[in-house]
Image: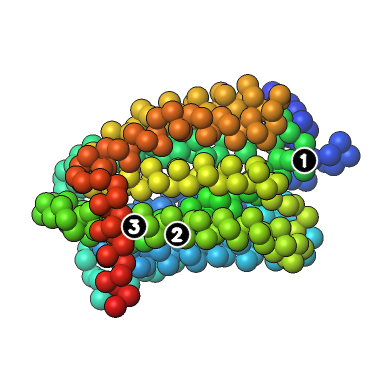
Amino acid sequence: MSHYWGNSYIRRSTLLTANQNPWVYLPAWGAFGFGYVTTFYYGYFNGLLQGRGDITSANKVIVITRGTLIVLGALLVVMGYGLPGLGIASLISALVGRWASMTYYFVDGRPEARQAHKIRSEQENRLLKTLWHNSWRLGVVHLGAFLIQRSSILIASSFLGLAASASYGMTITILMALMSVSTVIGNVQMPHLNALQVSGSRQELRSIYGEILLLAWGVFVAGMIFLVTLGDGLLKAIASNTPLLNGPELIALGLIVLLELNHSVAAAYITTKNEVPFLKAAVYSGLVIAGLSVMLVSEWGIWGLVFAQGAVQLAYNNWKWPMEAMKDLGGSWLDILRCGGRQIAKRFK
């Protein structure tokens, strides 16, 4: 029975043509799956690096992992390995990421790292009880984030043709990568924000938060301008046959991701208060976006997917969490951005 459903699903996928043997691609899907499992399972090392304040190493791991995926994936695609090549690149990048994170975590001069792995079971249980209060909530939030940001790719591949779904998937992947790059400064500043939150330094909190927002917006907008003007040219230069979405669709999706970036920064700030109030919102939004996308994609195509994500997020998350962050920080948006601008100017003096 499982053989029948697996074969049926793959044969119906728009990623394959009628003349292709779907079982040729099973190793590619297996490599993708194993790679993601490896990334998820060993992802706690990045959390440990961030927890001890080693933000630079944590970001180096991300750069090494994604850099390996991009470089190796592009190389294998150019060499003609196609989807299996991307699967292999995903698996190898996950293994490289695991090696890098463990190397940075167990670095010489940090004996407490190895000692922590010898912790007695009673201490471990007490620590788990303390951390579990918010850890499981953040885990569910990440599930909701996957539905919000990635479910549309699966829906596109099921309902749209190969060209449209490939362009949509490529565009979403690049925009998510750009969003990740834009939030690097926020990730680096998280330990500082936590310390300021504990000490109650409101003015400094406003300055750092404003700085994070301005830099994140600046990097993302600069990246969007590059994508709109030169994105397809760059893809052609690396022999990619898959273009980005057309201008209006790309700009609309970029604005949606920019708003996503804005409220993600606010949500990250809220977690410095040891609160995760957005759990239900993330899950419900993800489910509604997935359902609405399925309803609209057949009639509206790409615009149906864009509208579903944009409308649902704009209805609540896009304004709710930035407003909550502003309430806690005190002051107006303009005041916080001015503080952020002064903070940036200080760093360049």
User: In the picture, which quadrant includes the C terminus?
Assistant: bottom left
Q: Which residue is mark 3?
A: 212
Residue 204: give its label: none
**Mark 1 and mark 3: span between their CA atoms?**
38 Å
Judging depth in this view, the residue of 300 and 65 nearest the camera is: 300
Q: In the rendered image, which quarter is residue 183 located in? A: bottom left
Amino acid type at circle 2 is Gly
Q: Secondary structure at mark 1?
A: helix
The count of marks equals 3
Residue 162: give its label: 1
Point out the tag, 2 or 3, that comes first from the N-terminus.
3
Point out the tag, 1 or 3, that comes first from the N-terminus.
1
Residue at 39% from the left image edge and 60% from the top image edge = 215
Q: Which residue is mark 2?
A: 218
Amino acid type at circle 1 is Leu
**Residue 108 visible in rendering:** no
Q: Is residue 332 toward the left or the right of residue 295 in the image?
A: left
Point out the tag, 2 or 1, that comes first from the N-terminus.
1
